Every structure is written in structure tokens, then in C-alpha cells.
Image (cartoon, rainbow, N blue to C red):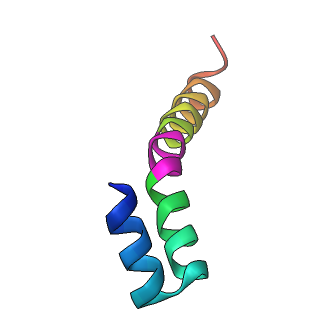
Amino acid sequence: MTTESIISMIGNLGFPIVVSFYLLIRLEQNIKRLEQTLQALIDQIQKGGD
């Protein structure tokens, strides 16, 4: 995203929506990694905690 496109989005959509959109994009990878870690933990617990 360029600065110009961000400013244009703020004007068209509003600041709170743009901030929410930006944060969702930035946090998506962290959420996916957390989901994978939780799944691995669940698998370990189901196996008996080896």
C-alpha cells in the first residue's frame, strides 16, 4: 500500500475502517501461526503428551 492509496481510503471509507483493515492484514500471519501452534498442542495432548 502506498501512502497515496492509504490517504485516499481514509477519505473514502473513514479512519476507523482503514485502521481495522490495516491491522487485520498485519495480524493475519500471526493469527495463522497461533492457529498452527494450538493445533500442534492439541495433537500432542491427544497423543498423551510425549
User: Residue 40 in the image: x percent, y percent?
Assistant: 52, 29
Residue 29 is one of the magenta-drawn residues: yes
Residue for point 53% across, 30% down: 43
Residue for point 47% across, 68% down: 21
User: Residue 47 in the image: x percent, y percent?
Assistant: 56, 23
User: Residue 6 in the image: x percent, y percent?
Assistant: 41, 66
- Quarter of the image with the C terminus is top right
**Is residue 22 left or right of 42 when viewed as pictured?**
left
- State the predominant SS element of the stretch in magenta: helix
Classify 29 as above or below 46: below
Residue for point 57% across, 69% down: 19
Residue in the foreground of this view, choosing between 24 and 8: 8
Classify 44 as above or below 11: above
In the rendered image, the residue lying farthest to the front is: 4
Residue in the foreground of this view, choosing between 27 and 3: 3
User: Residue 49 in the image: x percent, y percent?
Assistant: 67, 18
- Quarter of the image with the N terminus is bottom left
**Residue range (magenta):** 26-32
Residue in the foreground of this view, choosing between 25 and 12: 12
Q: How many marks?
A: 0
Residue in the foreground of this view, choosing between 23 and 15: 15
In the rendered image, the residue lying farthest to the top is: 50
Residue 48 is one of the magenta-drawn residues: no
Classify 50 as above or below 26: above
